[in-house]
Image (cartoon, rainbow, N blue to C red):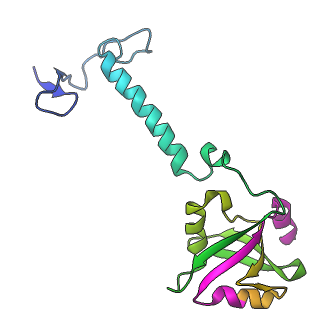
Amino acid sequence: EAMRSTSGGPAARTRPLRPPSAEKPKSKASGGGLCAVDAACCQADAACTRVEATCTRLIFPESEVMDELPAVEADGEFDVVVDKTSGSPLGIDIVYWENNTLLVEGVVPGLVHDWNRKNPTYRVKPGDIVIAVNGIVGDMHRLVDECTRKAVLRITIRRGTSGLLARAKK
């Protein structure tokens, strides 16, 4: 009878290798799985499932892990610092907004997207407002010009609300 290693090493435990058509033993406790036959495998499967769930929460930015991080409150301000000297795209879609500011309509691949992955507490998102870039305030045309420069950019963001984005699209 063919044997299969369960841990990969030469001195590993082996168990019979069943052809795919072979009937698998059923266990009432496990709903028909192999737990009745090999409890160690079931424990390993459960550990893998727990690790996989943790990794999934860490990989996806909108996961519950991210939601547990402290967030910037509405109307709170924070700085985003990105190095645009290499000419990489900034990665935000913006429109002219009230009081000589810029409204973030979206984040696309680029420096801000990279910033968001590295700084989840201070991530830029649609509805946020750009109020200053490298000390320039109160002139939305100069804000846009500054964002296009190949320089290190210090962008001051005011946390907006999702309602701002809806108002902008009217």
Residue 146 highlighted magenta (yes or no)? yes
Q: Please state if 88 lies on the left or on the right of 123 as rendered.
A: left
Q: Is residue 44 above or below residue 86?
A: above
Front residue of 24/120: it is: 120
Q: Please state if 54 lies on the left or on the right of 96 as rendered.
A: left
Q: Position of residue 10 (x, y in %)?
A: 11, 31
Q: Is residue 169 above or below residue 148?
A: above
Residue at the spot 17% in from the left edge and 22% down from the top edge = 13
Residue 46 placement: quadrant: top left
Residue 44 highlighted magenta (yes or no)? no
Q: Please state if 94 lies on the left or on the right of 48 as rendered.
A: right
Residue 144 placement: quadrant: bottom right
Residue at the spot 53% in from the left edge and 47% down from the top edge = 58
* Residue interval drawn in magenta: 145-170
- Where, quadrant-wise, is the C terminus in this rendering? bottom right
Q: Position of residue 130 (x, y in %)?
A: 76, 75
